[in-house]
Amino acid sequence: MLRRAPFVLRWMALAIGLVPTAALAQEPPVAALAEDASTSVAPADLPAEATDSNAMTLAISLVGRITGQYNSAFRIDPAGNSSLAGIEYSSRIRVRADAETKEGDHRWSVAGAISVDAIDGTLSGGPDSQSGDKLPGTASDSVVLQDAYIGVKYGRLFGVRVGAMTSQWGLGLVANDGSNGLSLDRNDWFTLTRAADRNLRLMLHSMPWANHEGSALRGLMFIAALDKVLDDDTATAADGQNAQQVVGAVRMYLAEKRWFGLYYVRRWQHHDVTATWNPGKDLRVHVVDAAMDLDWRDKETRQGLRVEAEAAGILGDTSLSPTPEYARHDVQQLGAFGRATWVGVAGTGLTLQLDGGYFSGDANVDDGKVTAFRADRNLRQGLLLFERVLAWQTGRARRTASDPSLVGVPAEDLDRLASGGAVFDAITVYPKIGYRIFDWLEVYGGALLAWAPSPLVDPLHTRTDAGGLPINFAGQKADGRYLATEIDLGARTTWRLSDPWKAAVQVALEQGFLLPGGALGTLTTQDNTDNHAYATRLTVSLLGR
């Protein structure tokens, strides 16, 4: 790691000379992401009117981060094995170029973008002796293409775009472009994201009444698209897991930063018989997602109130994870997430934030229904409970369920038990508070409280060890529905680079401490590790602004 760090930091420092116009694209991609049995579409912000003269803009940016995190050991399976304690190093670098031409009075414009994430994931310190699926610290990609598209539009009236795209819809419950933490405007506390899901897309968008002054429908936008999924939590085209989807969406702008909307997606997914995972299986679902973002904050000072909310329902059927009784399962999932943020008046430096979420669970894997909702992998809550503890325990589930001393022939598709750090089977309440002591120094903290709406169930050990009574992923009988209390504390300092450089350097130190509840059970191991988990994270970032 000491040999790699200077290389990464040199690249991050180089961005000071590469971002005179914009550190991130000013107009987000109009695109879609597909998530575990779900997908979405995100329209662009209200497009700018054409200028009166010929013009061309070009923005090149380089942003990123490097992180060192110390993690404690805790129980991860019924045998009492523990996760690996120690320091884990990770990084993420994004290079992006946006270009747009405008043709004055003709109102026609052409725009394109290309974005690449490099050195994304764990550099060193991840698991080397424990095996499992999607374990924390195992993901690493040298180069990931995020966006590569070109589009043509006629003012705000009509546009078409084609190519590889990512997206953000609402809070990112099922569609998340992974850009949180790469700009000052999208810089959530206790959050580190990775490269986003991505699609090949042909998309049309229109605002039919955009030029009708005084019309109540002026802010109405329509979207229609055809997608082929390149990679997401459910399908990876390179592994023979093919997914296509038809997308329709509508968004109503009340102002530039205040909107509400609805989208619908029909997804078909089939895995080739030669696919790495789940060969020959299929998934067919309908997804409906409603979202809103009502931002009353001052554009310059960011003071004021912002309220965001999103709810998604998924219906369909699948042959993934069949049982002897049911070759196909009905998919019935529900997820919702909301956030209220208040930034105090000038001079107080106070920020209050409250998150709350519901993610349906599935306590019975033998009833012909799949009801467990998993949020997008980039929707993070806290440092420990979902991102590490449950990611480790569910990631080990396939290994323990394949133990020949317990079962002759393992059940199919057990890799799908791994959460990969996603929030699932939970009701969460997460109040947070921050105080800006100086313009460049902020301290903050929060308490994540989580309950399981359905018993936290390891399917195999529930069948073999308890005769159907719920057994969690650590091999323990659940005592109630309370998952855990997680206390998170942090401090960060930010230096804005002077114009024309649209960038800032930030250093953040964050600490998380987890006390398990009865549903999660004890975290003690064979080595008598204390019944808690903790992590300390130091992150150095170059952010866009």
Image (spheres, rainbow, N blue to C red):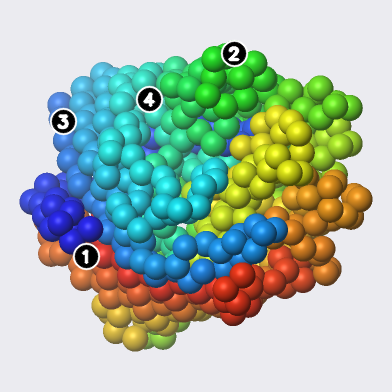
Q: Is residue 382 visible?
A: no
Left or right, 188 with reference to 242? left
- Which label sits on residue 273? 2
Q: CA distance from mark 4 to mark 1?
A: 30 Å
Residue tagged 3: 56
Residue at horizontal 32%, vertical 45%?
120
Q: Are marks 2 and 4 in contact (CB under 8 Å)?
A: no
Question: What SS does tag 1 mark?
Answer: strand
Tell me which residue sits at (21%, 70%) in the image.
495
Q: Secondary structure at mark 3?
A: strand
Tell me which label, 4 or 3, sits earlier in the chain.
3
Name the amino acid, label 4.
Ala
Q: Which mark is residue 505?
A: 1
Mark found first going from the N terminus, 2 or 4: 4
Residue furthest out toward the left: 17
- Contact, mark 3 vs mark 2 (Cβ under 8 Å): no
Mark 3: amino acid: Met
- Disc 3 versus disc 2: nearer the observer: 2
The residue lying toward the viewer, choosing from 279 and 253, is 279
Q: Name which residue type carries label 1.
A: Val
Residue type, label 2 = Val
- Find residue 74 and report its image quarter: bottom right
Can you identify the residue that label 4 sits on? 164
Give the camera-side residue of 215 and 527. Answer: 527
Q: Residues within 10 Å of mark 3 (few under 14, many from 20)?
A: few
Separation (CA) of disc 1 from disc 3: 29 Å
Q: What number of labels is visible? A: 4
Label 4 Cα crowd, 10 Å radius (few <14 / some 14-19 / many 20+): many
Residue at x 17%, y 41% (from the top left corner): 60
Residue 513 can be seen in this image: yes
